[in-house]
Amino acid sequence: MRYSSQVKPISYLKANAAEVLTQLTAQREPLLITQNGEAKAVLQDVMSFEQTQETLALLKILALGQQHVAEGKVRPVIEVVARLRAQHTRS
């Protein structure tokens, strides 16, 4: 696992919270917070967090798709398109 190049103790965060938030937003690089010399938390800006969550959701969809293929839960595209068109014309 790759850790952030920015590592700060919790005392720094307490003393410089506003500055830390400004830097997180500007640099979009996570900040590793330590307590008693041990890594305890990672802070990141909201945009980066949202992008990470979207990426994880897409990866989950991909993994589920691969699992369905491995389990044989697939249908020919012609069948799927025909079913979608039939549903569309009914609505």
Image (spheres, rainbow, N blue to C red):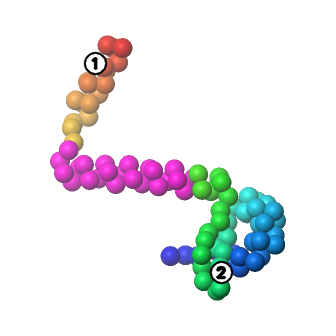
Quarter of the image for the C terminus: give it.
Answer: top left
Name, please, the residue furthest toward the bottom: 37
Callout 2 environment at 10 Å: few (<14), some (14 to 19), or many (20+)?
few
Magenta stretch, main secondary structure class: helix
The span from disc 1 to disc 2 (Cα, nearest Å) is: 60 Å
* Tag 2 residue: 35
From the viewer's perspective, is 63 left or right of 1?
A: left
Residue 5 lies in quadrant: bottom right
Residue 86: which numbered mark, if any? 1
Spot occupied by residue 58 in the image (x, y as percentages of width and height): 44, 50
Q: Is label 1 or label 2 in front?
A: 2
Residue 87 lies in quadrant: top left
Which residue is nearer to you in this view: 33 or 63? 33
57 part of magenta stretch: yes
Name, please, the residue furthest toward the left: 72
Residue 84 shows in this picture: yes
Which residue is nearer to you in this view: 33 or 82? 33
Q: Compared with residue 86, is residue 47 higher up or lower down, i.e. above or below?
A: below
Type of amino acid at the residue the image marks with label 1: Ala
**Magenta span of residues:** 51-73
From the viewer's perspective, is 18 left or right of 2?
A: right
Which residue is nearer to you in this view: 35 or 56? 35
Name, please, the residue furthest toward the top: 90
Q: Residue at x 77, y 76 (%)?
A: 12
Q: Compared with residue 47, is residue 5 higher up or lower down, i.e. above or below?
A: below
